[in-house]
Amino acid sequence: MQVKINNKNRSFNGTPFKRLIDVLREDFGLTGTKEGCSEGECGACTVLLDGKPVNSCLISICQVEGAAIETVESLGLPEKLHPLQESFLREGGAQCGICTPGMLMTAAAYLKAGGDPSPDAIREELAGNLCRCTGYQHIINSVAKALSENKK
Amino acid sequence: MPTVGHDRLRKEGPQKLTGTALYVDDIPVKGIWHGVTVRSSVAHAKIKGIRFLKGFPWRQAVVVTAKDIPGENCVHLIEDDQPLLADGITRHALEPVALIAHPDRATAYNALNFVEINYEPLPSVLDFEKSKKILKTFSIKKGDAKKAMKKAWKKVDTTFRVPHQEQAYIENNGMMAWFEPDGTLVLQGSLQCPYYIVKAMKPIFKLPEEKIRVIQAVTGGGFGGKEEYPNIISGHAALLAKKAKRPIKMIYDRHEDMSATTKRHPAVIKHKAGIDKKGRLVALDIDIVMDAGAYVTLSPVVLSRGILHASGPYECPNVNIHASIVQTNTPPNGAYRGFGAPQTLFAAELQWEKLADASKIDAVKLRERNLVKIGSELSTGQILKESVGLKKCVDTVLKRSRFTALRRDHDKWNKKKTSPTWRGVGFASVHHGSGFTGNGEVFLKSKASVTLTKSGRFVIETASSEIGQGSMSTLCQIVSDALGVPYEWVELEANDTSRVPDSGPTVASRTCMIVGGLLYRAAKQLKAAIEEKAKKIPTTPAVLKEVAKKLAGKKSVFRITTEYEKPADIEFDDTTYKGDAYGSYGYAAIAVDLEVDRTTYEIKLNKIWTAQDIGKAINPLIVEGQIIGGTTQALGWAVFEKPIYKNGVMQNAEFTNYIIPTALDTPPMDVVIIEEPYSRGPFGAKGVGEMPMDIPAPAVCAAIKQATGLFFPEIPVTPEMIAAGIARKG
Ligand code: FES
Ligand code: FES
């Protein structure tokens, strides 16, 4: 089975009903994607499927055959952060960091789509990603900042 | 350039933001097996037998029961009453009975379907209000509350109830264990208190402390939930590792984590208060009962903090408080941010609404007549000598929220028949003691070190755990400023008990104030030592390296270690509960603005204003993040979160039915940090982590009262409760 993961073609020969999150973490060593609930409620496992945020705990690998998957590893590196990661760092968008990869992927799609920078719109967009640490406000600020810098 | 008071970037931020930070489940370990837990399904019973049924390839697996424990079958904490694995009797549902490990995680879980436990039921107590088994009591007495209550101008008597609360960190509990060839037990996982685990493993495995090594993995939130429970998972993983002779990983799923691990203690608080004609609080008579669950865990300490905060941040000459914690056949409750104080402060604060009704004096005005200030005496007789920013907090919130005007506007809006909602704004103010209660810090004797390595790096050595609260950056800022070197020059040693001293647990809002204070002293001593060799602190790495070599001599590092010293003028008597319960207190005020839909009774939180006196914000962005995050957890407790139990088993142990606030549920927050420095805190800092949890719930209930006219002395307040209340009113 062929899948494009972070712009690289990969093949997978395991069981077709293996969950996408497990394939990413176990077969391809992409442990940036996190598991918080295994039932589509917390969003920690969010990745992009052909550019759209999805919960990788709810999808089996056979459902994404031939598609393009992007994970947090596709954004930036510790020494060279993506602008979105940079604004999360500066605005306090990550505390314990476990929700962060999922949050970033949802935000990355929003950023790419040139989303509405108003706090209410961002709250709406991020409503599927739970965070227990931040109370969201610094995450909202982080996304708003990345959006405004994107416009410049 | 000084860093304290500035938003320095999180040291561990770039790793967390790129998915390169390794949480326990991310660490690759060759040949590791997965452990799962067989749990009891009944609340109280004799275990007649455990059967491992046919149909599962048991030969591929390893099974552990209580008889495999090499030492004591006990999870050492305050009392040694909790077994690591139930032996012959289960005292709560979901109690661990046996352990299974298998090379494949899914297969390990599947094994649970092939285990059968036979029980002989015993009588169980599930409702703590009916429990007669008292585990611990405390009392505080000051003046003559009975007499004063009789003479009071107005008095009120209310029973308040608060439920369990799940910490709901997004990373579930998880731990790895293995034995080194020399017999050393190594544990690595998601945890707050590495040395708690060392102490708990000693009697179980009959190992000396040097043979137990605990390493913290990057931890995805704790909030108290990873304070004592990791002791149990560590013991389990280690038992399996011993028997399987290979590394074991135990990662809970959400359902197991929510239903089986510790929660906030539910409480019922019977609260009587009396005021005189001037609106001054003259008598408090309070009775607190909390639910420990089946074992003692940290309950006495939770109860202690609860009783010590029960009279609120107010002066009152006559106080009588009794607190007890009782046993039930439910999963044990334990540490959760706030640690007993949110429970008792809920009653202390919301009671002002009742006093306002009785006296026809506004609830905020009443509070203003009673706020503690420098020189005030608390219920334990403690005199507040410094650092009391309560009035500033109250004034700031009232002003920024336009509280009085807003309340008036809402009254007008609520009178209009055409308004689609009812609106309300509620207020609360609290205090929160920083650090361990009473003599706790004296017993702990925490240590922390700052070293200068031969290669010219400053390294902090502490067992304080970064769990998202920003302690890494905060401690590095304290040390870099104390030394007078750039923030980038200071780093933290890995939180590994083979490399760092016991700095005490990461709890009780103590990391910044207590451990930060130890490090501040160590850094100052180190600075003096450097200056002795070099006249002044070097400004280039090259010069620093030269000095480092001179100081270290034959050793690889030059190390200064400091240990907690009790300030001479702080005295607390554990038996009479008299004296200085805490060295210092934080203070906070809040206003919560909300509206209730007139058709659906849904509550919409609109805005929060809060001001919190924390002495000094070492890193204002991190402090603000703590305040907003803690406030959000408390808002969840006030309007959504309620574990529902049936036969002692949590029924809603998932995020689909245990609802925590999303970005949409959380209102924008206006946060002001007040800085009334504490002379013994590093740069004046007091604690910050827990206070935000104490304050929102009573303010929410006060706001709902203005909106709907309904007074709910319990949480969470749900649309169903409002509907029923409205129906009752007719
Ligand atoms: S782990 Fe997929 S949504 Fe929670
Ligand atoms: S930062 Fe901890 S859950 Fe979001």
Image (cartoon, rainbow, N blue to C red):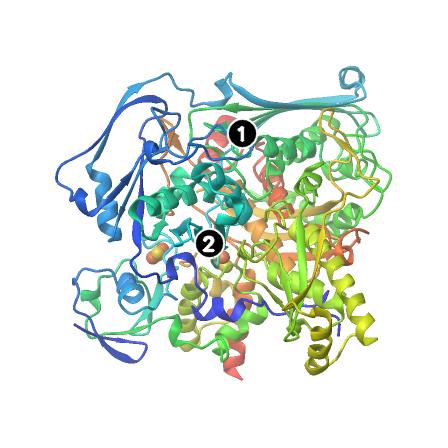
Callout 1, which amino acid?
Glu
Q: Nearer the viewer, residue B338 or B597?
A: B338
In the image, what residue occupies the spot 81% across and 25% down?
Answer: B276
In the image, what residue occupies the spot 49% across and 34% down?
Answer: B333
| Chain bearing mark 1 | B
Residue furthest to the left in view is B55
Which residue is under mark 1?
B79
Determine which quarter of the picture holds residue B671: bottom right
- Up/down of B526 relative to B173, above or below: below
Q: Secondary structure at mark 1?
A: loop
Tag of residue B34: none
Residue furthest to the front in view is B554
Q: Nearer the viewer, residue B346 or B580?
A: B580
Callout 2, which amino acid?
Thr
Residue furthest to the right in view is B375
Which residue is under mark 2?
B662
**Rendering coords of residue B646 (x, y %):** 36, 29
Distance between the Cα atoms at labels 1 and 2?
38 Å
**Rendering coords of residue B407 (x, y %):** 67, 45
Q: Nearer the viewer, mark 1 or mark 2?
A: 1
Ligand 2 neighbours mark 2 (CB distance < 8 Å): no
Q: Nearer the viewer, residue B646 or B468?
A: B468
Q: Is residue B373 left or right of residue B35?
A: right
Q: Is residue B513 left or right of residue B17?
A: right
- Up/down of B13 relative to A80, above or below: above
